[in-house]
Image: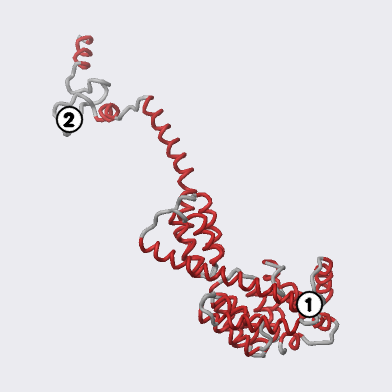
Amino acid sequence: MEENQNTSFYDDEGLCKLCHNRYIDRTGNPESVLCQTCREELIKLKVPPAIYAAMAAVLVLVAVAIFFFIPALKEYAVYENAERKAAEGYPQTALFELMNLNEKYPDSAKIAIKSADIGMKYFFPDYAGYAIDTYLVGKEVGEKDYDRLTGYVDELDKYYHTLDWMEALGGRLAESAGADGENAQQALAELCGSLMEGAEDGQYDQALACYYAGYYSGEMEQRIYWFEKSIGYNPMNYMAEVASANTYRRQGDVAKARALLEHAYSINKEDALIPRAFATVEMVEGNAAEALEYARTAYEWYPEGEYVVDTYIVALYDNDLAAEANAVMEEWKTEGHFFDEDLYALLAGEMSVYDYYVGE
């Protein structure tokens, strides 16, 4: 009787046919023969080993794609952000990064065109000329791009023609000055006259010609006149703004000088001559600490720039760092750098910083 009872227990249709321990769960399926636990275990997918191998291969491919995709994404970001970076005051960095892309992708007309656009807009014609000559000659471009690039080529022809003309003027200046420079003043006056004539001649790059007419002019009012004409021809000519600011500072008009420098800085935040010029304005206004900060920045960026090391020395002196100023001066003298007599007079206490930077 006991054996029959046990057999009857195992054959009970109400028990799970797999585990024989739990009752069948027919919720949602009247034909089910399994309990809820066993049914859930059986419906779990068992992944074959081959699937794991395939998944591993996919992960490798994804990793490889990411490895190559991220640099490409960064390069695309350089291309896309170049105009914004230039507009924020970093045209040189934007152009340098684009030139790296040009070298890596020499067949990409789009990169070269953007290099030319930024170079021409921000008064870096040499970058634009290089991009056009090296990466665009012989390539097919759209009609609008073609018309724009043709205009650039015409402007560049004027620019290089102007450089050749000024080089010839420089050669004549050296001849007129004489071996010992006895006619230097007369030769310089002749050079200025020629530059002023050329600045009014449409065959030359007038922004560039006006800039150099002002640069070599001996009279402050003339200098300002030509610098402002240069800016009028090309508002992005920040160099003319810096030169004009220095002239206004010489006249004691530090407010005008500062305004010009601030605009120049908005165009190009990377040229050492701008913080150098700011340093001189700060010293004229008696702000020695601020001047030293600007002068040190310019010196760290480009110590070989025009009057950069001189201004740094003056700023050190103006901050009671005469020993350091003299050390820097001696270092550069050993390199053959020429310092004017006024700087020696300043360091000897024979001239004030204000008088050094204001006046003829």
Above or below residue 178? Residue 99 is above
Left or right, 96 with reference to 358: left
Q: Position of residue 83 (x, y in %)?
A: 46, 65
Taking depth in this image into account, of 360 and 292 the one nearest to the observer is 360
Taking depth in this image into account, of 215 and 295 the one nearest to the observer is 215
Task: Report which quarter residue 225 is drawn in.
Answer: bottom right
- The colouring scheme, among rainbow, by chain, secondary structure or one colour, is secondary structure
In what quadrant of the picture does the C terminus appear? bottom right
Farthest residue to the right: give it: 348
Q: Residue at x 39, y 57 (%)?
A: 141
Left or right, 13 with reference to 329: left
Secondary structure of residue under mark 2: loop
Left or right, 324 with reference to 89: right
Above or below residue 29? Residue 191 is below
Taking depth in this image into account, of 76 and 324 the one nearest to the observer is 76
| Residue identified by numbered label 2 | 26
| Disc 1 residue crowd, few under 14, some 14–19, many 20+, Cα 10 Å | few
